[in-house]
Structure formats: C-alpha cells, structure tokens
Amino acid sequence: MTVTVEAGTPLKRLNVALAREGLSLANMGDIMEQTVSGATSTGTHGTGRDSASIAAQIRGLELVTADGSVLTCSARENPEVFAAARIGLGALGIVTAITFAVQPLFLLTAREEPMPLPRVLDRFDELWAENEHFEFYWFPHTDGTITKRNNRGAGPERPVPPLRGWFEDEFLSNGVFQAANWAGRAVPATVPAIARISSRALSARSYTDIPYKVFTSPRRVRFVEMEYAVPREAAVEAVRELKAMIDRSRLRISFPVEVRTAPADDITLSTASGRDTAYIAVHMFRGTPYRSYFTAAERVFTAYEGRPHWGKVHTRTAEHLAEVYPRFGEFTALRDRLDPDRRFQNDHLRRVLGP
C-alpha cells in the first residue's frame, strides 16, 4: 500500500490518479495546486485528530545531494536523513521521488455549519475528540464561525449538487468574497460590516464524497498568510488572546482566521514534531497592508511557543527557531554533512537555519 511519484507532480494530478486506481492519501490540505515535493518540504498539512501532515505519510524518498550522490531514504535506509528530509526546506538536497503510504479509497461525510465563537471555544476539546477532522473559520469583528467536521462513512456518495456547489463555493466563497475584499481594501471602515455579512452568508450543509473532493476546495481570492503551530492545549487561549488583540486595536480584518489540528509526529523540523498541535492562520487580502496585523499576531503566537509554518510569512530567525524546535541542532548538523559548501543556500535559508 505505497505509491511512488515524481517529486514535481502536482498534488491535483496525484489525487486524481490515486482515485482512478481506488486509492487515496489519508489526509491532505485544503488546496492541491502545489507539487508533492513543494508541499512536503514546507510541511503542508490539513487538519486531523489522528492523521498528520502530507509529509508524515511519506514512507521513502530519493534525494540528490550537493556532491551529486543519490540517497534512497526510509526508516530503514539512511534513517537520519529520512527523519529530516521529509520536511527539508530544500536545504539538504533535491527531492526527486517520494513514496507515500496510501489507503483504499474511502468516503468522507462533511458537515459544515455556523457556530458562535464562544461555543466553539468552550467545546473545542469535545469537537476535536469527536471528529476525525475538525476545523473552524472565525470572522474577526464578529462572534461568527463556520465549523467543518469530516468523518469517514459507509456511503452512499451524496456530493454537493452542482448548482448549489457553484453558488456557495464559486459565487459566494470566491466571487462575492472577492468583491467584498475589494470594497474593504478601498474603504477600511466598511470591513466590520462586511465581516458580519460574510459570517452569515453560508448556511449549514452536509455531503459525502471521496477524500480530495471533501478536503480540498477552490481558493481564487488571493491573500497573504501567516500560520503558527502552538501546543494543542494552548489553542483556545491563543485564539481568545488574538481576538482580544484585534478588538482593542484599530485593525480592520476582512479575512477569517483558520484553526486546525494535527497529532505529534517524528519529523525533525515538522511544526508538529514531538507534540500534539493546533494551527492558527491569519490572512490579509492581497494588496492590503498586513504587517501591523501579522506583527501583533506573531507576538501572541510566539508567547505560546509557536512554530511558524515554513511556507508562509513570518519574521523568525535561526536563533528563535532553535529554541522552539528541540531537534533543530540535529537538522543543522545533517545539513553541514550533506551540504558543507552551502550549494543550496539562499537568503531565506540563511535567516531560518543560520549560515
């Protein structure tokens, strides 16, 4: 039950090919435009009580190192490289092939419904424990959220009817939301009113479909994003503190805050390495000033031992990251061995890993 794929394959193509063969990944994020190596190397994840990131589903990989050597890596072969290269940031070499664990194709029943934020936070542990995949979106300047619960079911398939899917997922969630963000960017004072309308725009719905059609959704409204991983037990307090910060500020936030979870894993620089994790993501519409919001949010997240998503905006440096990743030194020592001349060095890696 493994499938080997070329590293440059888009996730979209992989998901369709697996479904055609009656197979699926156990979990995935909510977009599938990335390549498999890009997604795994930066720690892309979805939400899951028991199932972890895409990188955690890797059972083997092929890595071309700085001296041209080709390493085959797994839990048994080059295990120390395997532990790190699943989320390698491009710093250890070029990933050329990835072997994933797969499962027989299954069905997920999705339940999406509005719920007041105080109720979500009061019931967070319960909602997490009762559902295989739970997440919620909170709309700043309101107490409104949209909750999403995905659980395996026996079927039959009951996909979202095409007309309703177009209306809710394309017209409302993309078209109308895009127009609302244009208005908010032009006149920031309108953002709280727009947020109240947005938080009430979608009604409850339930549907059953194959995994990638449930986990993923079209994202056509462009944005800038920061996401931090905090210990799962700190999630509720961190969200409350984030809300309090926004409420007492003059910030105008038109994009919802997304909250997801993942179990602990054993990948060296995974945001969930060694601890059960909650992810809190903040967004701003592209072209809108975001630094004040992200700076204030980052102060909240780092106070809870937050680890930034490797593929999203953050300001942390190697000095800070070495404190929040217990195995940081293990990774940099491996980098010294595999790329002593820094063939794969760039400005970003110099900042987050050191010289």
Image: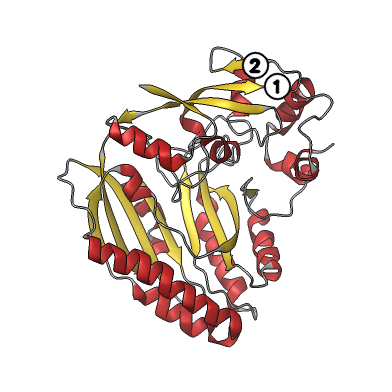
Please tell me which residue lies in front, 24 or 230: 24
Give the mark nearer the N terminus: 1 vs 2. 1
Residue 21, located in which quarter of the rendered image? Answer: top left
Disc ID at residue 104: none
Please tell me which residue lies in front, 244 or 340: 340
Residue extending furthest toward the left: 156
What residue do we see at 35% from left, 39% from top? 16
Q: Is residue 141 visible?
A: no
Q: Amino acid at mark 1?
A: Thr
- Verify CB contact (< 8 Å) between mark 1 and mark 2: yes
Q: Is residue 316 visible?
A: yes
User: Could you say whether the residue bearing mark 1 is in a helix, strand or loop?
Assistant: loop
Residue 164, located in which quarter of the rendered image? Answer: bottom left
The vertical placement of 95 against 53, above or below, is above
Q: Amino acid at mark 2?
A: Val
What residue do we see at 45% from left, 50% from top? 31
Residue 91, located in which quarter of the rendered image? Answer: top right
Please tell me which residue lies in front, 233 or 308: 308
- Total labels: the figure holds 2
Q: Which residue is mark 2?
A: 70
Q: Provide residue 292's location: percent of width, then percent of height.
A: 70, 70
User: Could you say whether the residue bearing mark 2 is in a helix, strand or loop?
Assistant: strand
Q: How is the image coloured?
A: secondary structure
Q: Provide residue 185's location: percent of width, then percent of height.
A: 59, 79
Question: How far separated are the C-alphas under marks 1 and 2?
Answer: 6 Å
Which corner quadrant holds the C terminus? top right
Disc ID at residue 65: 1
Q: Provide residue 206's location: percent of width, then percent of height.
A: 23, 58
Is residue 152 left or right of 321 when viewed as pictured?
left
What residue do we see at 30% from left, 36% from top? 19
Please tell me which residue lies in front, 273 or 77: 77
